[in-house]
Image (cartoon, rainbow, N blue to C red):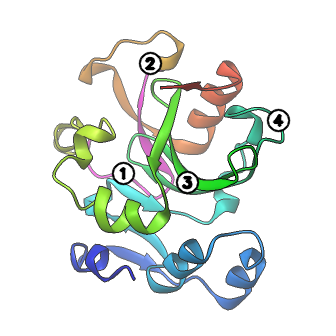
Amino acid sequence: MYEKFLSQNMECERQVADDAFLAKYANTAPKELITLWQEVGFGTFYNGLFRLLPPEEFIFWDDAYIGESGQIKPQIPFMITAFGDIFVWIYDTCLNESYVAYINIRKGTWKIGASNVKILFNVRILSNTCIKMFDLEMFPALVSKLGRLAEDECYGYVPALALGGDNDIDKVERVKFVPYIDLICQSLGDFEFA
């Protein structure tokens, strides 16, 4: 199901999702997300632009950050960008449908990134408009300026854009993604639908 995505990432860093992990999410995650974890696993793709992570890595995530309490459950975060932006699979009980939300940590906003995980990986990420769609144009310049990220890092604005910082390449640093994202999430409380 994710052959196209993998064919574009021959030199990626991957880890296998084991059976115990897959069993843990068998009753809550959609089939296409389980298949993604089976076929692709976890790791860094597109030279570090995208990172697939187990949901446990997102210890800071609270379902209340987007949507009304109880309306959007479950929420399963599964991927971040090099900027700390998060992709979350969501089931919306009011609409009775699921989708992938793109949480722009930098701006404090969120939008529907794709109608499902398969479309996100086989259409959106592979398209020529992906970089613009997810506001990632600065990535090549930051890799040149600051180097490749470590496994626990993202490029972060200091101070954070969502908290009044400037959108200037000189204000971007390599930061630990968990405390950086957690600080922004706790400071904002919830994210605006963009």
Residue 52, percent across and down? 48, 64
Please tell me which of labels 1 and 3 falls first in the chain.
3
Give the farthest residue toward the front.
Answer: 95
Tag 1 secondary structure: loop
114 w.r.t. 63: above or below: below
How far apart are the two marked residues, 2 and 1, measured between alpha carbons?
Answer: 20 Å
Rendered image: mark on residue 69: 4
Q: Which residue is mark 1?
A: 149
Residue 83, percent across and down? 40, 40
How far apart are the two marked residues, 4 and 3, measured between alpha carbons?
Answer: 17 Å
Q: Nearer the viewer, residue 65 or 90?
A: 90
Please tell me which of labels 3 and 2 falls first in the chain.
3
The region drawn magenta spans: 146-160
Going by the image, does 54 lie left or right of 123? right
Report if the CB atoms under discs 1 and 3 are less than 8 Å apart: no
Identify residue type, mark 4: Ser
Q: Residues within 10 Å of mark 2 (few under 14, many from 20)?
A: some
Please tell me which of labels 4 and 2 falls first in the chain.
4
Q: Which residue is mark 2?
A: 161
Marks 3, 2: nearer the viewer: 3
Q: Is 10 within the magenta?
A: no
How far apart are the two marked residues, 3 and 2, measured between alpha carbons?
Answer: 26 Å
Q: Which residue is mark 3?
A: 99
